[in-house]
Image (cartoon, grey):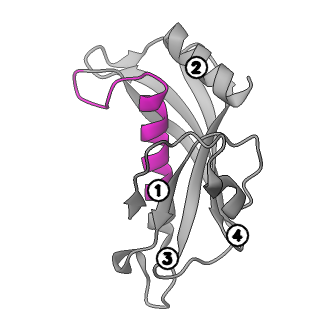
Amino acid sequence: MTMRTRSNFLKGDPRQLKFSVSPEWSYGIGVEAAWSDLDKLGHVTNSAFWRWSDDVRVQYVIDMGLPVPARDAPSVVVVQAAGEFHKAMEYRQVGLMTCRTTRLGNSSFDTEHALWLESGKAFTATFTLVLSNISIGGSIQLPIAFKERIAALDGL
């Protein structure tokens, strides 16, 4: 379950202190493990971690100025993903899934994600993303305003 808050920007947000999130992470969404996220051992499944990564990434690019994903609008497409699981997460446990950009190209960019629990980092992932236009069937340039917002937020 993704918990919506007034703002997903973390500057001055008490969640950054609660989950010991280092200051270079400026964007995140709250998450809470639901019953449907559990496996037979009572741990959150891998698919929940990936789903929360998708949730934060989509909200991040929207908040940075890209349109809501739709068939007739440019959309961010994942072309590469890698993840590492560090700690188990249990039912009703809450955390903060963060996202930041580490590289900006002409039509692609790389992001890092981390899921922070009060007990430490539970999951990290990296993604390479391409801005794509389905109607033309290819990649398109990242808008300058989008790149400027990300550069300002993530210190690029």
Gap between marks 2 and 4 measured at Cα: 31 Å
Are the residues at dot 1 and dot 2 in contact (C-beta closer than 8 Å)? no
How far apart in space, not on screen, are marks 3 and 4 (Cα)?
A: 12 Å
Residue tagged 2: 149
Cα–Cα gap, marks 1 and 2: 23 Å
Mark 1 or mark 3: whose residue is earlier in sequence = 3
Please give the label number shown on residue 52. Answer: 1
In the displayed structure, would residue 45 be above or below residue 105?
A: below
Q: Residue at x 52, y 76 (%)?
A: 93
Circle 4: residue type: His
The residue tagged 4 is: 86
x and y percent of residue 43 in the render?
Answer: 52, 83
> Which element type, helix, strand or loop, lies under badge 1?
helix
- Quadrant for residue 136, please give it: top left
Between 14 and 138, the one nearer to me in the picture:
14
Residue at x-position 57% and y-position 46%: 81
Which quadrant does the N terminus fall into?
Answer: bottom left
Alpha carbon separation for disc pair 1 and 3: 12 Å
Please state the extent of the stretch shown in magenta in the rendering.
50-72
Q: Residues within 10 Å of mark 1 (few under 14, many from 20)?
A: many
Which numbered disc, 2 or 4, marks the residue that appears first in the sequence?
Answer: 4
In which quadrant is the C terminus drawn? top right
Q: Which residue is mark 3?
A: 44
Within 10 Å of disc 4 (Cα), the crowding (few <14, some 14-19, many 20+) is: few
